[in-house]
Structures are given as C-alpha cells and as structure tokens.
Amino acid sequence: IMKPNKGKIIIQGRLSALIEVTAGFHGELSGRENVYLNGTIMGMSKKEIDDKFDEIVEFSGLAEFIDTPVKRYSSGMHSRLGFSVAAHMNPDILLVDEVLAVGDASFVSRCKETISEFKRQGKTLILVTHDLDSVSRWCDEAIWLEKGVIKEQGEPQLVIDRYLEQVKQKEEKHLQDVNVENAKEDEFRIEQLEEIGDKSAELGNNAKRCGNR
C-alpha cells in the first residue's frame, strides 16, 4: 500500500489488503455505503459489488446494522465488514495483518476457512502475525523479522522453532537477572540487619557501663 524505500515489488494479479480494520471506511457513512466505498477503493466495479452485496453482508453477520453509521461499530464489527469485502473481491493476492485477532470465535472460524479455501485455489497469501499456529497452518515460507531486520527465513516450522528458542533464552536470561538482583537486595538487607544488630549491641554495652558507674 506504500512505495518501498528500497528494492522492488512486482505484483502479478489482483491484490487485496487487510492491514487496518478501519482502513477505507468513512465513519459518517452507513455499513451499506461503506461496502461500496471500500469495494471501490479495492478495485471492484459497482456491478461487481451489486452482485456480491448480499453475500458480503451475510458473511459479515451485520445485516441488522448494515444501515447504521460505522462510527457506531465496534472494532470487531469493522473487522467483519472489512474482511467480508476483501474476501468477496476474489483477489489473487491477499495481505493480512493481525486483523483476525478481532471478532468473535464464529466469525474468526469463517475467516480462517475462507483463507484456507483461498490457499487451496493456489492463490498468494502474505500474512503478518504473531499467531504461530496460523503461520504453521497456512504458510509455505516464513520470515522472522526483528526491528526491521530478517533474523531467519525458510521452512515455517524451522523458523518457528528458532524463534521460540530465542524467546526461551530471553526468558531464562530475564529470570537469571531477576535472581541476581534479588540476591543483591537480600545481601544488602542482611548487611543492614547486621549493622543494626552491631549498633544495638554497642548501645547495650554502653548502657551497662553507665549503669555500673
């Protein structure tokens, strides 16, 4: 959706993107109007939207609210409508960025089945996600990015295993650092208690000497 500042991207076919659940929506317009607006932005003709409108609404499960301004929609409702439009434009390439984290279980299940069918048809899916199960389920190749740098690239399960290994190492190091810090704090407290004990003993001895006098 933006020009790269490095390299080159060659796209062959019709592309649809689900990058942000509110992208392509106008808050003051109804769900019905936004289906046409969003579909047009994605490259669908009015006739194509007319033909698929009922299917889009049925898939989204928002028939009851389709004439309500989308500014009153929850993020889950935005996601439903956006995904429904994108899924019905019949793209050759689908970009998906974490939007499946929003919505109820039933809708997410329908979305995943749609993506699985998309894959079965031999189309291209580019998935940006922290959901490792989805990567394992749908991807033929995985790229692990960290701060914009490729850490690992290749067979999904291999990349996932190496990613999880680093997560484990970071957690172990964090626990070690916490334990060292706790040990230092315990040592400091013991030293303070010993100092208090020494001062108390000294005061007690001074008190005894004063009493003997």
Image (spheres, rainbow, N blue to C red):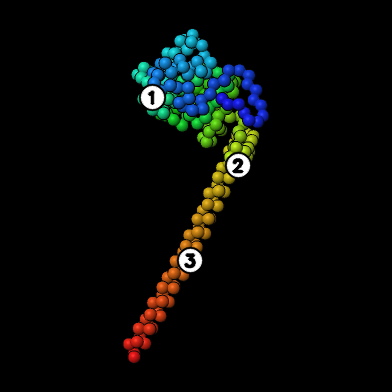
Q: Name above or below for residue 189 compared with residue 157.
A: below
Residue at disc 3, secondary structure = helix
**Pointers 2 and 3 in contact (CB under 8 A)?**
no
| Inter-mark Cα distance, 2 to 3 | 37 Å
Q: Position of residue 192 (x, y in %)?
A: 44, 69
Q: Name above or below for residue 188 compared with residue 30.
A: below
Kind of residue sitting beneath label 3: Glu
Residue at disc 2, secondary structure = helix
Residue for point 50% across, 31% down: 98
Q: How many marks?
A: 3
Residue for point 63% across, 19% down: 12
Q: Position of residue 47 (x, y in %)?
A: 49, 8
According to the picture, the residue beneath numbered tag 1 turns out to be 71
Q: Quadrant of the C terminus?
A: bottom left
According to the picture, the residue beneath numbered tag 2 turns out to be 162
According to the picture, the residue beneath numbered tag 3 turns out to be 187
Q: Quadrant of residue 190?
A: bottom left
Farthest-out residue, top = 47
Kind of residue sitting beneath label 1: Lys
Q: Nearer the viewer, mark 1 or mark 2?
A: 1
Which comes before the other along the chain, label 1 or label 2?
1
Farthest-out residue, right = 7
Which comes before the other along the chain, label 3 or label 1?
1
